[in-house]
Image (cartoon, rainbow, N blue to C red):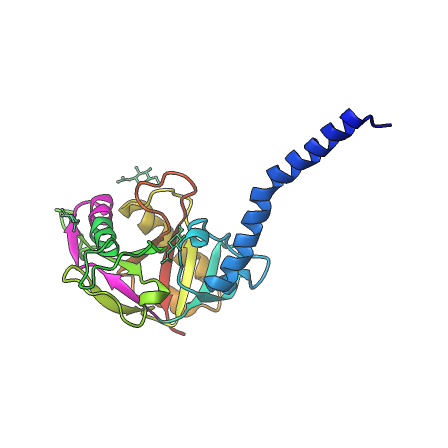
Amino acid sequence: MYTHRQTTYYIIDVYIMMISFLPKIAYSICFILSCFLFDHHAYFVNGKKFPIPLNCLRYECPSYDIIQTNMKEGFEIRKYNSAAWASTRLISSTSFILAANQAFLTLFNYTQGANDRARKFNLTAPVLIDVYTPTPPSSTRISSYVIYFYLPRKYQKRPPLSNKVSIVKLPPHEYAAVRRTSSAFLNQTNTAYEVSSLRNSLRGTSWVGAVTAPAAPLTAASYNAPFELKDRVNEVIIWFDV
Ligand SMILES: *[C@@H]1O[C@H](CO)[C@@H](O)[C@H](O)[C@H]1NC(C)=O
Ligand SMILES: *[C@@H]1O[C@H](CO)[C@@H](O)[C@H](O)[C@H]1NC(C)=O
Ligand SMILES: *[C@@H]1O[C@H](CO)[C@@H](O)[C@H](O)[C@H]1NC(C)=O
């Protein structure tokens, strides 16, 4: 039997338990709400799909439909909805990481008010990185890079302008074959490796268009800012038509 004092402790215990669950409950509610607010429906088509990057709960991410997820081969076929993205100019560099960081700063400035309407807006994810390697490979090892920032829905119709960025429509092709990479930080070597692994895993499937798609550029999608060290998510993409 509980004494009055024990009952009080019991109530306090229950109270503490409830408080400790609150963040989880709040998180679940936010998560469910975010499905409606941020058009994440595409990520919930079936049980077998790549886990949603944490930054897509925090930031807006472009929406897509999953056509097929092949967990055994580790790829996903997606259909992205057409959307406006801000892109940097072609950047020539010997280093993937330097080029990506330089581009990130340009795009970050653009989101922080360096645009014709002095608009500040949140980051989005992912940043797309196109890598054009010279053919034949040159001894200088200089590649060219174009980096793309997905515009928040609010600015899709009338994007803020800047002479540092161009506004483009993506995707370039109807389908995307996607592989989630194991590397937390992408560089030219592991990006090229992941793209060729993706291409190999698509051989013998019905996605022949992805296998025969042009080898250039290599496309990577990075869901984190360069300074984020935890929970990093990267993907490589082959755009193709059928
Ligand atoms: C970003 O903006 C700052 C100040 O607004 C400027 O000094 C810097 O050069 C800009 N960087 C890039 C990469 O545009
Ligand atoms: C920007 O992100 C924060 C949370 O990270 C959110 O509270 C805010 O509403 C967002 N702003 C816009 C304009 O989406
Ligand atoms: C690229 O990243 C991999 C790890 O994913 C690392 O082993 C390799 O040394 C890096 N290469 C360059 C050129 O930085």
Asked whether 1 or 194 is in front, the reply is: 1
The location of residue 117, given as percent across then percent down, is 20, 63
* Residue drawn at point x = 56 percent, y = 53 percent: 29
Q: Tell me the quarter of the image containing the C terminus.
A: bottom left
Q: Is residue 152 above or below residue 95?
A: below
Q: Is residue 61 left or right of residue 66?
A: left
Q: Is residue 58 above or below residue 87?
A: above
Q: Is residue 43 left or right of residue 173?
A: right
Asked whether 105 or 159 is in front, the reply is: 159
* Residue drawn at point x = 21 percent, y = 52 percent: 109
The residue at the far bottom in this view is 242
Magenta-colored stretch includes residue 8: no
Q: Which residues are magenta?
A: 83-102
* Residue drawn at point x = 40 percent, y = 54 percent: 59
Q: Is residue 66 left or right of residue 106?
A: right
Residue 72 appears in the picture as rendered: no
Callout count: 0
Magenta-colored stretch includes residue 86: yes
Asked whether 9 or 105 is in front, the reply is: 9
The location of residue 196, given as percent across then percent down, is 36, 54
Q: Tell me the quarter of the image containing the N terminus.
A: top right
Quadrant for residue 176, please give it.
Answer: bottom left
The location of residue 82, given as percent across then percent down, is 36, 71
